[in-house]
Image (spheres, helix red, strand yellow):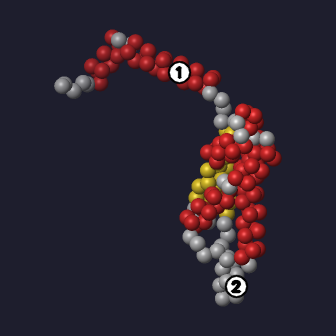
Amino acid sequence: MANLTLRELMRAVWRRPGWILLPILLGLGAAYALIRVLPPTYEAGTLVMVEKQKVPADYVKATVTTSMEDRIRTIEQQVSNRENLERLIAELGLYPEVRKQKSMADAVERARRDMKVQKQGDSIFSILFHYSEPVKTAQAANRVAELFIDDSLKQRETQA
């Protein structure tokens, strides 16, 4: 197989422009059709910073002794538990079509798929939420963070 020079390649393209233009036009047309057909999806996120204990361990015993990775897994379970998600769905009126056609359990499962908890740094994690309405998306991300903070405060009070 011979190596083509740039000049030979340009000549081949010039002789048969359809070989290049047709795939480009078909790709653009397919992309435009998908944009028109697929529903819009928005993503909202909130950052939560986990502060380390400020009082020296000599005075007060630490209430949290696990690593950040373990805490993220625990946080994800707390945030995505059925009770919290049902409350979120009911408060914000999320997934009305799913609740009409199926059950609340299906709506909860969909909310779990649409939510992600990601570690951002040593003591920061983000809660991301995907939904079809921008305002409800932002409200849901903020409300999930509020529910987590409330649960966390209750747990710390119990441990203390």
Badge number at residue 30:
1
Residue at the location (70% across, 81% down)? 55
Badge number at residue 60:
2
Residue 64 versus residue 127 in the image, above or below: below
- Residues at badges 2 and 1 in contact (C-beta under 8 Å)? no
Specify which label sits upstream in the sequence, 2 or 1: 1
Rendering coords of residue 26 (x, y %): 48, 18
Q: Residue furthest right?
A: 91
Rendering coords of residue 136 (x, y %): 76, 42
Report how many numbered discs are placed on residues in the image: 2
Rendering coords of residue 64 (x, y %): 64, 74
The residue under label 1 is which amino acid type?
A: Ala
Is residue 133 at all visible to an observer of this figure? no
The residue under label 2 is which amino acid type?
A: Val
* Quadrant of image for the N terminus: top left
Q: Quadrant of residue 33?
A: top right
Q: Quadrant of residue 92?
A: top right
Label 1: how many Cα within 10 Å (few below 14, some 14–19, many 20+): few
Could you tell whether 100 is left or right of 31 in the image? right
Could you tell whether 100 is left or right of 72 in the image? right
Is residue 48 at all visible to an observer of this figure? yes
Label 2: how many Cα within 10 Å (few below 14, some 14–19, many 20+): few
Residue at the location (67% across, 70% down)? 51
Q: Residue furthest left?
A: 1
Q: Secondary structure at mark 2?
A: loop
Measured in 3D between alpha carbons, the distance from the residue under mark 2 to the one under mark 1, in whole angstroms, is: 63 Å
Q: Quadrant of residue 102?
A: top right
Residue 128 versus residue 103 in the image, above or below: below
Q: Secondary structure at mark 1?
A: helix
